[in-house]
Amino acid sequence: MSKLRYLPLLLLLLPPFYLDLFWLQAGLFVMAAAIGAIGLNLLTGSTGQLSMGHSFFLAVGAYGYVYFAGESDEHLVGLGLPPVVAIVCAVVLAGLAGLAFSPIAGRLSGVYLGIASLALIFIGQHVLFNVHDVTGGYNGRAVPPLEIFGFTFDNSGDVAPFGIPFGGLEKLWFVGLILLGVSALFALGVLRSRPGRAMNLIRDQQTAAGVIGIPVARTRAAVFTLSSMYAGLGGVLLALTFQRAVPDYFGMLLALDYLAMIVIGGLGSVTGAIVGATFVTLLPQLLTRYSDSLPLVSPPGTGGVSPADAARYLYGAAVVGIVLFLPAGLRGLRIPSLTPRKETTP
Amino acid sequence: MTRFIELLINGLSLGSVYALIALGFVVIFRATEVVNFAHASLLLLGGYVTAVLHADLGFVGALAVGVLAAAAVGALIELVLLRRAKAPRQVVAIATIGIDIVLMAELSRRLGTQVLSLGDPWREKVVTIGGITVAQTRIAALVVAAILIGLFLLAFKYTSWGVSMRAVAEDSETSALMGIRLGRISMSAWAVAGALAAVAAVFITAFPTPGLDRTSSIAALKAFPAAILGGLDSVTGALVGGLLIGVTEALVGGYQNDLTFLGRGLGDVAPYVVMIAILLVRPSGLFGTREVSRV
């Protein structure tokens, strides 16, 4: 029984064969957001360190990939590395950016870090808009498609398993699944072993953690670095899905979205991060798609409540409601037949 | 030299406005130990109400309504969220982000692409003294902020409200046992903070800024570094932090043509750089209480 309950996850392999591009793109956004949210949840949920700078590391990942994989031309610079190497480099770059912030991330606790990390957003935006060569300035820059051993993840080629033609998003779907799966398993591993326990103790009893020999500042800095690497990977997948990276996107609102995700899903849990990412990412897309048939929501540009605004009201309210009534997040809503009886809480 | 003095006066005036905002922020933190991430949207709300009503009620009337509205919403947040939430304070702080998301979405939807004037009586008039030209709004900001901060400090020191507030900040359990009603104290803190933010909205959006638009809250956000670099739990810190941020922003913004190698729009980033620099040396801010724990 215990292994069998993972079987439904295999259903995730099916969408590319059945769903249209809108849903595939939405799904890929969810996967990218989920990877980022898992990272933020390690930091905020499990270690108690608030971060408002998450969108900065997403940007580092996205532009890191574009820079390492892109080719130089008269306006832009790029190193033209193989995309797989570029992904690794981008994630490492995001990690280094997180590490560079560690003198702050290690010393400040909780909300203090939250406010201090606001700086990352504003300094980040400043840099993104000014480094035209790398980011393409205000209009952004096209993202080179992923390519693994000569197999390109775009609309080229003639790939049609079971008679269904596969374009870029279909192919990318499987890459997204693998990346998300590996990220989730890694985070679970961290949470269930020594570092996870150390992180939780730092969150709950910082003094006690210090007393039993946990290096508090070093652990905080390490978690911050790890969480920024997660954000970097999320950023790469986001860029690959968007196929264009625009600096404006990686602002304050995006950082708030990620915090909303982890609160809505459930603080400190990997499943929670995925659930929250799904909720916050899909909501605006769903409302946009069905804005014609929904009451109170009008299509963008007509002056009424646009779907994006409606989504913001809903998940803003969801954050407040969940803090008030469901402290464990949506993950705390248990469906008895799907959840195992015994839970090993990390 | 004239330019330097002009910039310095502008900086001090801007700083006093940041200090007003940061003061409310610190008051909330002292009374409830919650960081209010919805502060910028409270400011935007106060400003928006003032902007919409000033044609009908006149500037003073509209401002009064704006101040009341922001104070009422602040008190409402306290009543609905803070009193009921049993989650750790840090999680409640994230919940205020939820409120911020909702308020901000609604206000920016209403504002759209408009730039509203708040109808202040100083408009774009300037004063010239000894070759130094300063906008009247900047002087008004300094004077109003100084009066409000002075009043607040007097109330904080001498009234029974101020004494209870300080007692709660010191030890909320004991003060509750002594008969101080915690709910009232924290609600009044939120109301005062909202009111101060609404007043600050006037000067954040007045000349030389074009007016109230959806980016006004970005300016208001600079009160966050002001509050934290002074020390989140210190009233003095909020004042010093505010002035420091204001002067930095004005000077860096004024001389940015000499600093083009660092990119354009440097004035908006400088406050955050200063914050990081100070936090590196003093993690609890300039005047904040150092965290000391005994075992």
Image: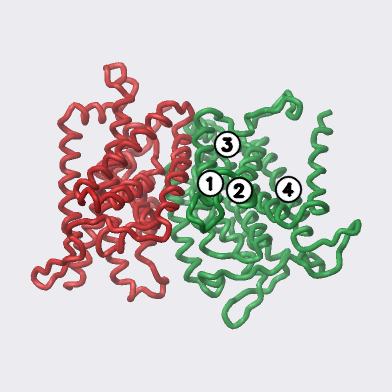
Chain colours: A green, B red
Mark 2 lies on a secondary structure that is: helix
Q: In this rendering, do the residues under marks 2 and 3 share a single chain?
A: yes
Q: Which residue is mark 1?
A: A310
Residue type at numbered disc 3: Leu
Q: Are marks 2 and 3 in contact (CB under 8 Å)?
A: no
Residue type at numbered disc 1: Ala
Mark 1 burial class by Cα count in 10 Å: few <14, some 14-19, many 20+: many
Q: Which residue is mark 3?
A: A267
Q: Which residue is mark 4?
A: A182
Mark closer to the chain start, 3 or 4: 4
| Residue B251 in the figure: left or right of residue A303 | left
Please state which of residues B240 and B224 is positioned toward the viewer in this rendering. Answer: B224
Mark 3 burial class by Cα count in 10 Å: few <14, some 14-19, many 20+: many
Mark closer to the chain start, 1 or 2: 2
At x 27%, y 37%, the residue is B192
Mark closer to the chain start, 4 or 2: 4
Q: Is residue A343 visible?
A: yes
Mark 4 burial class by Cα count in 10 Å: few <14, some 14-19, many 20+: few
- Quarter that holds the N terminus of chain B: bottom left
Q: In this rendering, do the residues under marks 4 and 2 share a single chain?
A: yes
Displayed quadrant of residue A58 = bottom right
Mark 4 lies on a secondary structure that is: helix
* Chain letter behind tag 4: A
Mark closer to the chain start, 2 or 3: 3
